[in-house]
Amino acid sequence: MVAEKGTISINTENIFPIIKKFLYSDHEIFLRELVSNAVDATQKLKKLASMGEFNGELGDLTVKVSVDKEAKTITISDKGIGMSAEEIKKYINQIAFSGAKEFLEKYKDTQDTNQIIGQFGLGFYSAFMVAQNVEIITKSFRDEPAARWICDGSTEFEITEAEKADRGTDIILHIAPDSEEFLENFRINQILEKYAKFLPVEIEFDGKVINNPNPIWTKSPAELTEEDYKNFYKELYPFSEEPLFWIHLNVDYPFNLTGVLYFPKIKKDFQLNREKVQLYSRQVFITDDVKDVVPEFLQMLHGVIDSPDIPLNVSRSYLQADSNVKKINSHITKKVADKLQELFRQDRKGFEEKWESVGIFVKYGIISDDKFYDRAKEFTLLKNVDSQYFTLDEYREKVQANQHDKDDKAVFLYANDANQQDAFITSAKKRGYDVLIMDSPLDAHFINAIESKLEKVTFKRVDSDSIEKLIDKGLAMESVLNDEEKKQVEELFKEVAGANTVQLESLPTDEMPVTIIQPEFMRRWKDMSRISGQNDMFGMMPMGNNVVINTNHALIDKLLKTTDADAQKQLAKQLYDLALLAQGMLSGSDLTRFVERTVAAL
Ligand code: ADP
Ligand code: MG
């Protein structure tokens, strides 16, 4: 065969400077692309052998990656199907370039280059992101002469006959001066570790096989033991605690999806975790940014999903619009709901024990996805301050009789800090009320979501009203004070209560003389805007507390009977501080003074 020179048919003279520029952050994917091409070529040969179309010796099919620091080359060698000179022209010159061409067209049309940067794999031609010259030396499994192709990244290429006895392909990258970082073994290791860890053909680098070609998600659940799942989890996240449980995904219609999703133990202040769900396509790692594939509320899960229906070389916007991706998304939601339901039904106790972690997913799911609520309402649990768990139905049943207000609403009382709100919890319990504990960062939103789903249920924090009004049964108590006395009490407390609103109420004599409450509605909006990180009107507003005076309390009577004006003011201040103390709002020198005054009064 005579040496042939040719021109690749692309309009632009030299597209690579552009590609290089816009794919800068993702240069390392060249290795993913070339190694997965080598794997594809090997798989194709195996397939042909299994169909009887290749009868030669398969031999050792390991794909080998090597670096020659002196020569400044990286070589990827496979024993796959190889290519004839004609095939190079067809598959490399025409087809592979079309990916590059498509990239350029997209690039031309879009204003938002961010959409394509880093998400657009270029297959074979990504090699030019790091190489100034790329050489292919290949011999087809068919009886054809070996061929050598070389190209400098311009549209010019040269193709000649080559000396190569064995079947397969060597891709030799002559690394460009600005990409010499890729001549470091550790760097290559790092990239292979990231993208090639579970490729289905053995990959060797630096004398070692770096991958596990048969990860558990490619097997059937029936072949696997609990140990296998736990070991695989360790393999993925060596530094994590054991997972709570897992879901093996295995779908082949209407889309193809396999994978194992793990429920991790979650700390209460769930920090952003670095261990993420990894997305693969035929065992090639694509990304751990699964934003569009996995529903948002499940992104705290760990594990792997693999779908050949999610194309390797895609832009983010494509992923969002892809109908398979949408279907995968809702399939995962359904599977997760099924699994939780199964656990709940089979082992309620065990489910309750895991609720602290599981509840985060369930609450997040309920907040963000109406469909999920429909499935989750059966196993959504509420926990009370005595650590008992109830489903939503069970809880309504429990409080139905005693916690009804005059508008016929069931009032679910809750505390978000059982220590701080202890005085309020005690008051509530004295009336036979039950108090839930809602101390997760998601609870403000969760409460809102649940209220909008359940009919005639309202949530109130125990310190959001005086005990009488917390569940307003419309039975007002008589006040022992006359209007004149009431006015006097109000004035006295206005003086000590600063900007807070003073509110007089006739409460039972054994309730606190003075309490500080935080009205539910305002506080809840503040909580929600704080959690969502918004500094809106509500978030910025100072918290207006209400000071509730129990006009029926003996100390209020004593206050009125105190004739010395100074002593009277002192007592009002002392009662107000006592209320602050109960709310954990008294500290520093105020607390010291309070103690001193108390001692003096004894
Ligand atoms: P894709 O892999 O998506 O088809 P690529 O640009 O990565 O696109 O590769 C283009 C084509 O070049 C492949 O489809 C294949 O036919 C051929 N090819 C690339 N690398 C090899 C290889 N190592 N052995 C055999 N054929 C290859
Ligand atoms: Mg490819």
Image (tube, grey):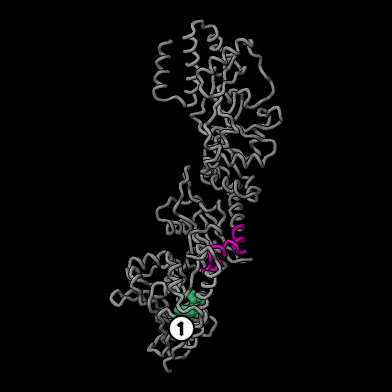
Magenta stretch: residue 321 in it?
Answer: yes
Which range of residues does the magenta coloring cover? 310-330
Residue topped by disc 1: 82
In x, y percent, where is residue 308? 55, 68
Numbered-mark total:
1
Quadrant hosting residue 171: bottom left
Q: Is residue 138 left or right of residue 436?
A: left
Q: Is residue 186 left or right of residue 386?
A: left
- Dominant secondary structure, magenta: helix
Q: Tell me if the residue at label 1 has its CB under 8 Å from ligand 1.
A: yes
Magenta stretch: residue 483 in it?
Answer: no
In the picture, the quarter occupied by the C terminus is top left
Give the residue type at disc 1.
Answer: Gly
User: Does residue 35 appear anywhere in the picture?
Assistant: no
At 42% across and 94% down in the image, what residue appears? 2
- The extreme bottom residue here reads 1
In x, y percent, where is residue 408? 71, 30
Q: Is residue 40 above or below residue 497?
A: below
- The extreme top residue here reads 563
At 51% across and 80% down in the image, what residue appears? 10
Q: Could you tell me which secondary element the residue under label 1 belongs to?
A: loop
In x, y percent, where is residue 224? 51, 61
In the picture, the quarter occupied by the N terminus is bottom left
